Image (tube, rainbow, N blue to C red):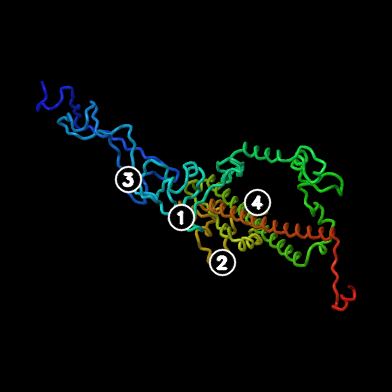
Amino acid sequence: MPPVGGNASPTQKTAPRKKKGTATAVKAPKRARTSGGGRRGGKSGGGGKKKSATSPGTLPNGSEDGHGAGAGGGSSVTGAGDSESDSGPYCLCRGPDNHRFMIACDRCEDWFHGDCIGMDKYTGENLVQKYICPNCSDGERYVTRYKKMCSLEGCTRPARIYDPREPSIFCSEEHCQAWWEQLIATLPRTKGTNQFDFLTQEEFMGLLDTPKRRSGEKGAAWKLGDRPFGVSDDFWQTVDLKEALTAEERSILDTSAAERYALGEEIVLCKKMLQLIDMALKRREAAIAAGKGTAKDLCGYDVRLDTVGVSHQFGAFLQSPSGEAIFKAGRLDAPPPPSSTNPGSTTAAAENTDPFTAGMCLKKKCKPHVGWSAIMIKSAKHSIKELAAQAREKLAAEARVRDSAAGRFRRKRLENNSVVVYDSDSAMEDVV
């Protein structure tokens, strides 16, 4: 039967009816990206939302929009091949996107056409490190920053100076090798009659291959890589310290050596702390093996660990009879019973006389001592690391002072200079 109304074309088919409760999938429009970072839809310098372009109104059956429309209405159909556009306004020209290359300002976040600011697409995508638009640029602080290009002439790719593993002023190893080949090619292969001051290619390569240390007999010619006033390894065993070092330098070295010795003593104390913590852990394990508790519930903190972490108090503990006995035996035994002169020792740990748990915290899930072993071990190891770093810094400073003094001493000996002091101007005039 013909459709009701009689206005529709006989060849036009009605759209299939959707099932009830079925949603139609609508794909979001693709958004192009630029080198300035962010999506085109995120421009913030003005302009509204993007509008998808539609076709002039061509229906699937080939008829134009407005002619032969069915009962469903006369809406236009979106062209699959058409691209989206952005109305803007952007850039200095305050125009639309128009699918041209654009870059965003890192300060005002507005977008600019490459044609309007005189920047091509390759430069914007590969060589710009930070772009500042003409409106935000002040010529001093806020300016566009570019990446360093490869040092090989003619290459416009960025160099690898930003690579933390292998920084280089070239973009690749091939261009580095090509740069050296071009440099060597500028040197003559052989020496001419009037070119005594020029290096040949063979001589230049020989200088590059020269070892860092001079080999041969004493007094040989200096070569590339040698230090003019280098110091031998046994220099300080063959020279008088009073001649090589000034009074100020000797004072600096003596003070630094004393400070390094004190740091070494503190490191020894920290290692003793770790030994005492290990003894306390072994005593806790022995108490658990004797049935005094479980590994999950028994706290096991020993009262003799109270001084761990405090260098001065722990040093006094090591010099006490109790501390000397512990480290001589290499284990933690039950502490002696509290003396009558110490009426404050009324805690449960002090009143306990069991040889396995005397002086030990027997609480289950003890909050004051939670994680005591891990915390103390970590603190002691961190202290050792910090003290060792300070000692290395002082040792390096001492080495710099000695090297400077040794170089000065050898230079004075080789120069063979002397200073004459005159008591008065008249005596100096007589010599002249």
Q: Residues within 10 Å of mark 4 (few under 14, many from 20)?
A: few
Residue at label 3?
87
Q: Are marks 3 and 4 in contact (CB under 8 Å)?
A: no
Question: Is 407 above or below relative to 205?
Answer: below
Residue type at mark 4 is: Gly
Residue type at mark 2 is: Asn
Which mark identifies residue 367? 1
Left or right for 349, reference 238: left
Q: Quadrant of the N terminus?
A: top left
Q: Which is more toward the observer, 187 or 78?
A: 187
Where does residue 8 sit, x and y in percent of width and height?
A: 14, 26
Is tag 2's residue or tag 4's residue first in the polypeptide sequence? 4
How far is the residue under mark 2 from the one under mark 4? Answer: 27 Å
Q: Quadrant of residue 390?
A: bottom right
Residue type at mark 3 is: Ser
Residue type at mark 1 is: Lys
Residue at label 4?
330
Q: Nearer the viewer, mark 1 or mark 2?
A: 1
Question: Is 62 above or below relative to 194?
Answer: above
Is tag 3's residue or tag 4's residue first in the polypeptide sequence? 3
Q: Residues within 10 Å of mark 3 (few under 14, many from 20)?
A: some
Q: Which is more toward the observer, 197 or 126?
A: 197
Where does residue 10 sit, x and y in percent of width and height?
A: 15, 22
How far is the residue under mark 1 from the one under mark 3? Answer: 66 Å
